[in-house]
Structures are given as C-alpha cells and as structure tokens.
Amino acid sequence: MTYKPIIIVAGEPNSIFFEIYFKAIRYKKFRSPIILIASFEILKLQMKRLNIKKKIRLIDFFKLDEYKFDYRYINLINVNYKQSKPFEKISHKSNDYIKESFNLALKILKKNFSNKFINGPISKKFFLNKKFLGITEYLANKSKSKKFAMLIYNNELSVCPLTTHLPLKEVSKKISKKMLIEKITLIDSFYKNYLKITPKIGVVGLNPHCESIHPFDEDEKIIKPAIKYLSKSKYKVFGPYAADTIFLKKNRKKYDVIVGMYHDQVLTPIKTLFEYDAINITLGLPYLRVSPDHGPNETMLGKNLSNPQSLIKALTFLDQQK
C-alpha cells in the first residue's frame, strides 16, 4: 500500500513548532513520507539550539515526482528567510515567508501529489491582520470553499464551534439555521467517509439554559428549527442543550460531537477534558487539513519543554489515510 506524503508548513519561524516536530518524529515512525516546507536557515539554527542531529535533504518543488523519500532525512522544500539567531520577537516580518510557504503547499495539494496537509502555528494578530478570523477561513478562501467547519477532534469526543474567532457580541448576529445545517452536514459526511460511523451530534443552545428574556430567542427561532429539519432528514442530531451541563460525564458520553454556537463555549471544556490530546481538522476543503491545537507559544521558545502530543495525533491521523 502506498501512502501519500504529508505536507507540512512549519508556519511562524519564531514558534515552538520545530521543537515539537522533532519530538514527534522521534516518538513514532510514520508510513507516510513527510515533506517540510520551511526555511533551511531557521531549521539549522533551531536544530543547533535543540541539539538535533539529523540530515536535511533539499527537495526541488518542480521535481517532486522524481524523489524516493528517505525516512533517514528531513525532506525540506526551502523558503528563504534569514535570522541571525534562532528566535526573534514575532512580528509582521515573517508574513511574506509564511504566505510563500502556504502558496507552495497549496500548489502541491492542487496537483494531487498529496491530499494531506498540516500547518504549524501562525500568529493571527500579525499574519492575518484582521483580514480573516483564522487560518480555517484563510485556507477556505484560498481553495474557494464556501462551506467549511472547524472540528476539534478526539476519538472519544469532538466539538465544533458554529462561529470561530468572532467577538462574542457578534455571535448572535452571525448564527443562522442555514449555517447550522451546513456545519452538521459536513460533520456527518466526515465521520461517515473517514471514520466509517454515523455520528451522534448534540447541539448547545446560545443562551444560558436555552432561554432568553429578549423578544427574539435564537434557541427557539434558529437552533430548534434547524435540528428539527436535520432530524427529519435522518441525521442523528439532538438538542438544544444547556451549555453548563452538556459536558457532564453522563451527558457527553451520549455523543460523538458537540456543536456549540461560539468558540470558547465548546473549546474551553474540550481542552479541559483532553488538554493536548486533540487536533483541529478543517472540514469542507478539497484536501485533509489538520493542525495541532495550540499556537506559537512565545513564552516557551527554546526551553525544550513543549508537549508534542497534539502534533503526534495530527500526524497519526493523516498517516492512517491512504
């Protein structure tokens, strides 16, 4: 059986990514070849800082089909970016480098050399610069995907926020019956296609106890009608439930996925339950995009103390796909 390569964009050069990457490939051998898109100079600097002894093999982007990838080496497509020291303060300086890294990865994915993609942590503040809510939206825009969803996946329980990195005061204006139906349809399709199960999906209400003192009650006017429509269409969807009790052990074990109305409503409990044992999967793209569920983590740079578990989970998930 031949496994397609996993394409990795290292992301922000001043992040913990290379540290967790080396810990991940030391921890486990993967069947899928790994192609890293990053700066050769930054990679060497951080390898020296972390005392990593591994050979780098430079890969020509235009000759990918000619290579037989060797697991003894780091297979690297170089993107020029120079620093005099391993780490600098995160700033706009790396934007062009990150953009070029993404562009190369997307070209590889578009020509079907691979359908497996991981990106390392990116600073939303500097790279996205308020043009996109997150990398999920950035990649959806790049691939012209109109319907997409963020799934924070763990094989015991996953969550999906209906809205992502949106200010709380904007959430009630954004949610709609159409959006909820689209996200749940994507979740159901993903679970059936990749995990071979029909998921049981619990939906959380927007308001405390699914009640509102205002004339327009989103739980009654938006969420309940969407669930009713999906249930009639044979989806295993239930709710809406109060957010303060759905994650109790006896409640959460009934579901494969819990869908919330906003980011922290479901990401706070899932990270409390599983910490690093979860990955971020973008549904609805023409390829499998996974990212470790953490950011650049500037405070941990160079300390060699960062936990690689989320990256190991991301690599393991993609390695299971042909």
Image (cartoon, rainbow, N blue to C red):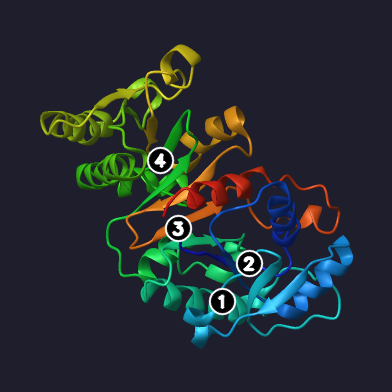
Q: Amino acid at mark 1?
A: Ser
Q: Considering the image in quadrants, where does the C terminus appear? A: bottom left
Query: Are the residues at dot 2 and dot 3 in contact (C-beta closer than 8 Å)?
Result: no
Compare marks 1 and 2 and give the one earlier in the sequence: 2
| Earlier residue among tags 4 and 3 | 4
In the rendered structure, which disc, 4 or 1, sits on the residue that comes first in sequence?
1
Q: Secondary structure at mark 1?
A: helix
Q: Quadrant of residue 259?
A: top left
Circle 2 residues within 10 Å: few <14, some 14–19, many ≥20 = many
Q: Name the mark on residue 10.
A: 2
Question: x%, y% of residue 43?
Answer: 75, 72
Asked whether residue 211 appears in the rendered view, the answer is no
Secondary structure type for disc 2: loop
Q: Check if mark 4's residue and mark 2's residue have beta carbons within 8 Å.
A: no
For the residues marked 4 and 2, what is the alpha-carbon distance in whole angstroms?
Answer: 25 Å
Query: According to the image, label 1 marks what residue?
Result: 101
Disc 4 versus disc 3: distance between alpha carbons? 15 Å
Depth check, mark 4 against mark 1: the one in front is 1
Find the residue positioned furthest to the left: 232
| Numbered tag placed on residue 160 in the rendering | 4
The residue singled out by tag 3 in the image is 289
From the viewer's perspective, tell me whether residue 303 is left or right of residue 9: right
Image coordinates for residue 40, horizontal then vertical, percent: 72, 79
The picture quadrant where one finds residue 12 is bottom right
Q: Is the C-beta separation of discs 4 and 3 under 8 Å?
A: no
Q: Amino acid at mark 3?
A: Arg
Q: CA distance from mark 2 to mark 3?
A: 14 Å
Question: Residue shown at 32%/49% (left/top)?
Answer: 174
